[in-house]
Structures are given as C-alpha cells and as structure tokens.
Amino acid sequence: MLMKKIMKKVLVELLKDSKKSDRKLADLVGVSQPTVTRTRSKLVKNGTIRDFTIIPDFAKMGFEIMAITTGVYKVPRSKELIEKGTKWLNKHPNIIFASKCQGMGKDAVMISFHRSYEEYDTFINDLSTELGELIEGSENILISLKGFVAKPFGLKYLAEHIET
C-alpha cells in the first residue's frame, strides 16, 4: 500500500523531530492542525508509527560499547527453542534490536549496548549458557561509543532520503 502524500509528509517531519506539535506540523505540511492530528492518529493506529521516543547520546548515558552480534541458528528450530530465545531477548533491555537476517553465512542479528567490556563479556557468556542449544556460533562487532563517530545514529537522515 502506498502511503498517502499527507501521511508521508507528516511521517517525514516526525522522523526529523518527533516532538513537533501538531500546529507546527500543520504549518510545515501545509494542512490544518485537525488534519495533522487525524493523520498522526492513523499512523499510530495502522502501526506505521510504533513509538514516539528520543535518540540519546549513549556515551553520555554511560554506555561504552554498542555490539552487533550475528549468529547461525542450529537446525531444526523447535517452537520451544524459539520461545526460549524470544524470552531471553526480552529479559535483556540493553538489546535494542534482534531479527532474522541473511548474508555472510549468518541468519540472526542483534544490536545491544553495554556500559563496559566486563558487562559485555558477562552478556555474551549468558548468551552462550542460556541459548547455546539454539545458536551454532556467533561473531561480534564491538563499537566504541566514546571514540570517533563519523555519523551519529539518527532517523533524520532517513527522512531526508524519503523526501528525495
């Protein structure tokens, strides 16, 4: 389904800055404030917008490491093992994303944040202990959040891409 033009414009503006008021959005999009309010409600109701949140400076919050972990599921995957894996993922609030994937011989990916290498090491040991029967192997990329960052994480860049 193609997104209607007004819905797309409202979504792009919210990606740039989700704290904009409906009045400000109306000015930017060129429609009335009630139209923006209805459009925002439709975007939430249909699931296009899942959350209104902020993107913090993770290093200032005390996180030193962002980890991207890829793995290979063992086959066969039973319903019980998948439920166990989902339960494990949900008990770790430092995991911000986990999904199936394809490429480089991997079929699972996870992104997590850690306050220190020791915390990360404990996390990986817990992963191996708790889900070893589900995961054949994993590889990790550790990203220092205190070092050089060429382009900080943000959704406004995506908004610029959608506009073009």
Image (cartoon, rainbow, N blue to C red):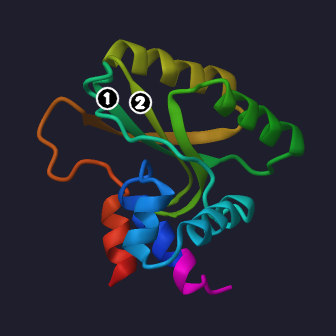
Badge 1 crowding class, 10 Å Cα cut-off, few under 14, some 14 to 19, many 20 or more, is: many
113 horizontally vs 109: left or right:
left
51 horizontally vs 77: left or right:
left
Instruction: Give x and y (percent) for residue 2.
Output: 62, 87
Residue 21 position (above or below residue 131): below
Q: Provide the residue span drawn in magenta.
A: 1-7
Instruction: Give x and y (percent) for residue 125.
Output: 52, 19
Quarter holding residue 45: bottom right
Amino acid type at mark 1: Ile
Give the SS element for disc 2.
strand
Quarter holding residue 43: bottom right
Q: Which residue is mark 1?
A: 65
Residue 145 position (above or below residue 152): above
82 vs 41, nearest the viewer: 41
**Circles 2 and 1: CB atoms closer than 8 Å:** yes
14 horizontally vs 101: left or right:
left
109 vs 115, nearest the viewer: 115
Amino acid type at mark 2: Phe
Q: Which mark is residue 113?
A: 2
